[in-house]
Amino acid sequence: MLRLNADNRPVVATVEASDFPWLLAGEGHHFVAVDTTGRVLGYLFAVPRTSNYDDKEIAELRRLIAEPFYYICQVALAREHRGRGIRRTFYATLAEAARRHGARLLCCDVNVEPPNPESLAFHRRLGFRQIGAGVASNGFAVAYLVCDV
């Protein structure tokens, strides 16, 4: 997953192995797509509003949204596997899990500088709408997006 993260920079934030304790502690949801050889094709990490996960982006979303939500911390997909429905499956599976846990919204942030038009278009197709903008912890300008589950 770390290699896939590196391959998707700068449109995704850098993730290091030390960033995973919250994930290993069972907070939130993670989904990984692998091929028949075990090669990671993509992943999605998400945490609920009530998670101990704390970064500038989720703090801003907590300020903007009072109701229960799941924050998509990061999603990455190998370029050669885009357009095959993997991301859409991740999001549908997360939405189902979020509903089971009482959340009403999925939230994320998408880079606007440096631009990530592919991600913005993908999220809009899924029904995400912008509720704010800011500067992420990595210094990138981001749009904060939400979608009803």
Image (cartoon, rainbow, N blue to C red):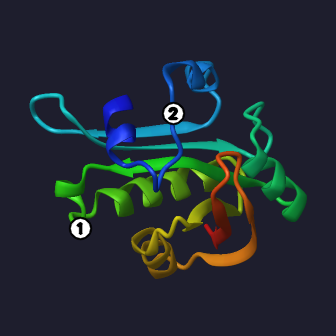
Identify whether 7 is placed above or below 110: above
Q: Amino acid at mark 2?
A: Val
Looking at the image, do the residues carrying marks 1 and 2 touch, with CB atoms under 8 Å apart? no
From the viewer's perspective, is 116 left or right of 147?
left
Count of residue discs: 2
Which residue is at a point 45% across and 52% down the rendered structure image?
10
Q: Amino acid at mark 1?
A: Gly
Whether residue 127 is visible to the viewer of this picture, yes or no, is: yes
Which residue is at a point 23% across and 67% down the rendered structure image?
83
Secondary structure under the numbered disc 1 in the rendered image: loop
Q: Quadrant of the C terminus?
A: bottom right
Near-viewer residue (64 or 6): 6
Q: Report, in whole angstroms, how far the alpha carbon at label 1 lies from the one at label 2.
A: 24 Å
Secondary structure under the numbered disc 2 in the rendered image: loop
From the viewer's perspective, is 25 left or right of 35?
right
Question: Crowdedness of circle 2 by 10 Å Cα count: few (<14), some, many (20+)?
Answer: some
Residue at far left of view = 37
Displayed quadrant of residue 33? top left
x and y percentages locating residue 22 in the rendered image: 64, 24
Near-viewer residue (99 or 115): 115
Q: Which residue is mark 1?
A: 83
Which residue is at a point 29% across and 56% down the rendered structure image?
86
Q: Closer to the observer: label 1 or label 2?
A: 2
Earlier residue among tags 1 and 2: 2
Displayed quadrant of residue 131? bottom right
Question: Crowdedness of circle 1 by 10 Å Cα count: few (<14), some, many (20+)?
Answer: few
Q: Quadrant of the N terminus?
A: top left
x and y percentages locating residue 29 in the rendered image: 54, 38
Q: Which mark is residue 27?
A: none
Q: Which residue is mark 2?
A: 15
